[in-house]
Image (tube, coloured by chain):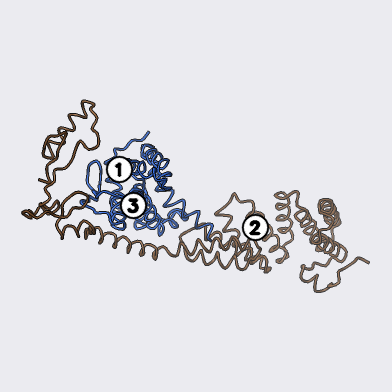
Amino acid sequence: MFFIPGWLISIATFPGVIVHEAAHMVFCRLRGVPVFEVCFFRVGNPAGYVIHGDIEDFKTSFLVCVGPFILNSLLCVFFCFPAFVPVRLFNIGDPLSYFMLWLGVSIGMHAFPSTQDAKVLWRAAQKAVKQWHPLAIISFPLVVVIYAANVLRFFWLDYLYGIGVGLVLPQILFKRLL
Amino acid sequence: MNEMFVVFGQSLCEPCANAELARRESGKEKIPVGSVTRQVDPTICFRCKNDHGDLALASVSTLPVCEPCHSFVMHHPFPVWVKASFAALVALAVVSFAHNYRFFAAYAEVQQATRAIKSQQLPRAWSLMESAAQHVPEDAELQSAASFYHGLQLMQEGHFADAAELLRRCRQAHPESPVIGQLLLKAEGAAAFEQQDYDAMLAKQLALMRMLPEDPMAVASVSSAYACKYAVSGEEQFKKESLRYLERARGMAPRDQTQFAEYEVRVHHRLTTREILSPREFEQRYPQGWKAE
């Protein structure tokens, strides 16, 4: 098994870390959650963080936690899109295309919410499920999936996700649309 | 104040609070929720640290903030470098898409050409593949595909020598492809017929028959080549060979195959009259068909 330290992967894919934290911040701003401090990237653990205020309603909590999955995935597709046809379908590359693919895949690799995000979501879901909040009910298996995804990073699941969303998915959609 | 924490009842600064927690965690002690709280002075802004004397500030998530800082934390701005970087990268993505647009156009044309070939719209397929090859001239596969489609088009129009030239180029790029090999032999055989080189025609048709031994038309084309040689030389052995292959092809052809029936009539005409007519000439001379007297 080819093992690379997490901090090294974070440095190599730092745009993804920045977008991950920015996604948390975007949803905090959209949902009126105060943001006290933001670190978009640093060499350390965690590589980035957002310190925000308490969140009262579960829907906001859910969106803030899952925000990176939405925004990182969308931006992964957006930045890979201009380059995936020449590189993947024609095997013809140039520095700009390779840069866009690195950028897109890096962003996609940090789409998964962290285990800290999962913990916050779990605590919030425990309270909200007492009111039978539908999002809270689906959050329990979702938290399990988030934990599993973070463990499977050791087996490059995050990289496979970035490649899948940035390169494979557009190819499938392109073929169907054309 | 606001920088101090109450940890299990003790007021500690942040480094000491972290050290106390680390000591308890290393001793496998549980840290229940609520055992660590921030000490807050409601008159000192949490963010800018300004002391507002006796004025108790409004709080955001239990933390006191002054009015300007309240606005800041509620609408925390993105740093300039984040906004500028994002704008630059979006612009770069647009530039990259514009730079690579020809690949998208070529791919779309290839997909459309493939569908056109499947629905037997050969001129449209060729036109699309030609356009795709022009969009991406550095792709050898596309050039080869465009030559292939062009070759098919030329064969359909009856320009067999030109078709053979293009198909030879495709063959060089794909020597293992049986389809290209068969089409090339057909084009070369037809070109040899046009040039009245019936030895070459026979050689090509025999090679094609070896590739497609179960195809009645491939077998019949050998009969046609022998009929040409008989028409020119008058040698009976060529007539015998022609009839032999024609019989063999008839045994393989389905009963209702019109194409084979018409082919058979032309071969018989050639053997009877020793006159070599192309399919077009034959149709023009005998629009109602021909029967031996």
Secondary structure of residue under mark 3: helix
Q: Which residue lies furthest to the right in this view?
A: B293
Residue B91, picture quadrant: bottom left
Residue B54: where, in percent of width, then height? 6, 53
Name the mark nearer the viewer: 2 or 1. Answer: 1
Q: Is residue B97 above or below residue B36?
A: below
- Label annotation for residue A60: 3
Q: Which chain hosts label 3?
A: A
Task: First in sequence, mark 3 or 1: give its number.
Answer: 1
Residue A43 at x, y percent in the picture = 22, 44
Residue to which mark 1 is pinned: A9
Q: Please report, as a chain letter, where disc 1 is located.
A: A
Observer-nearest of B187 and A55:
A55
Chain A hue? blue
The amino acid at mark 3 is Thr
Image vertical order of residue B28 relative to residue B122, above or below: above
The answer to which quarter of the image holds residue A4 is top left
Give the CA distance from mark 2 to mark 3. Answer: 67 Å
Q: Which residue is drawn at 60% across and 68% down?
A: B124
User: Circle 2 marks a residue in which chain?
Assistant: B
Which residue occupies 86% across, 69% down?
A: B289
